[in-house]
Image: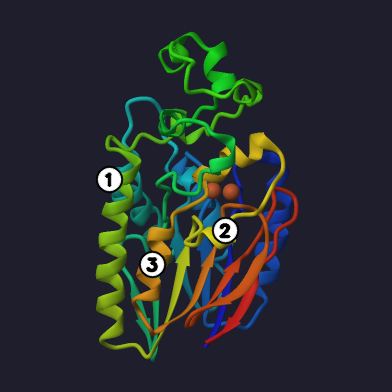
Amino acid sequence: MRIIATADLHYDIARSRGPTLRLAEEVCDLDADVLLLLGDVAGRDPEVTLECLHLFDRFRGRKFFVAGNHDIWIDPGGDSVRRLEEDLPAVCRAADFQALDAEPAVLGSVGIVGSIGWYDFSFRPARLGIPLRFYREKIAPGAAARLPAYQYLVEDRSDIPEHAFQIGTRWMDGEHARLLMSDLDFCHRLLGRLEDHLARVERKAERVFVGLHHLPLWRMVPYTERPSWAFASAFLGSELFGEILLDHPQVRYAVCGHSHKPDRFSHAHFECVNVGCTYLAKRYEIIEL
Ligand SMILES: [Fe+2]
Ligand SMILES: [Fe+2]
């Protein structure tokens, strides 16, 4: 089985649009059985997501979608979990895609499973010494100190290292993704579903391909000296997802996106791949399974 996987098309962002159109043309000309789009497809507007999915109408194989954090950004008052679990699967059906977050698939002897993945802040770098409350609010001390709404985070400065006030990073899921539950509870909701989907496909499949948006292993987190980027490492993924994959020997591939940095290595019984599209340079992986 020939599988094409890409991620982070960000079709809603102007500078990503041309590169996505070119990638879609190229992919549609390829001979492959499966296409997977692994998150950050087109952002908050389902109409734009639908438009992006239709770019792959000419693709001759089965088409699968995994959501990314940008795909569950939502307007004030909205519900990102409903977007993930109900709205996006419906958008996918309208464009002949299947949303793997909702339902896995078995094609011959291959199982196809997917999850947006998420973060539990365990990838936060200890060397920054920033207290957990800043990660929970997705804002670094330098940004919190400037914004009136976040003064409660910096009222007691005794546990905040001075250098941290130079870090002005905000992880914008904090503003635009409305989970209506904690990030950890969301992780566990996703982990339960991933476990269930793996168990379901393994009854019929010899080999399993897992597509995620967030990184399932700490080893995949790109190292950076820059404190602003190091703060953002906390939001790249969670090892809890990798641990589930370790428990399932039929998993052969775990492919993700999100960090925008290509990566590939073998881990236990499976191969880990990060597709590594940037906003300007789109790429895809061809995997034989
Ligand atoms: Fe992205
Ligand atoms: Fe992302």
Q: Give amino acid for label 2.
A: Gly
Tag on residue 257?
A: 2
Residue 10 seen by the camera:
yes
Discs 3/1, front? 3
User: How far is the residue under mark 3 from the one under mark 1?
Assistant: 17 Å
Tag on residue 185?
A: 1
Residue 42 seen by the camera:
no
In the picture of the structure, the residue carrying the numbered disc 3 is 243
Front residue of this view, candidates 162 and 213:
162
Residue at the image point whose x is 45% and y is 38% from the top: 73
In the rendered image, the vertical position of residue 75 relative to residue 206, given as above or below = above
Residue 97: where, in percent of width, then height? Answer: 43, 65
Residue at the image point whose x is 26% and y is 77% from the top: 199
In the rendered image, the vertical position of residue 65 relative to residue 227, given as above or below = below
Disc 2 C-beta below 8 A from ligand 1: yes
Residue at the image point whose x is 46% and y is 30% from the top: 131
**Circle 1 sits in a helix, a strand or a loop, which is it?**
helix
Q: Give amino acid for label 3.
A: Glu
Relative horizontal placement of residue 260, taking residue 201 as reference (left or right): right
In the rendered image, the vertical position of residue 229 relative to residue 91, given as above or below = above
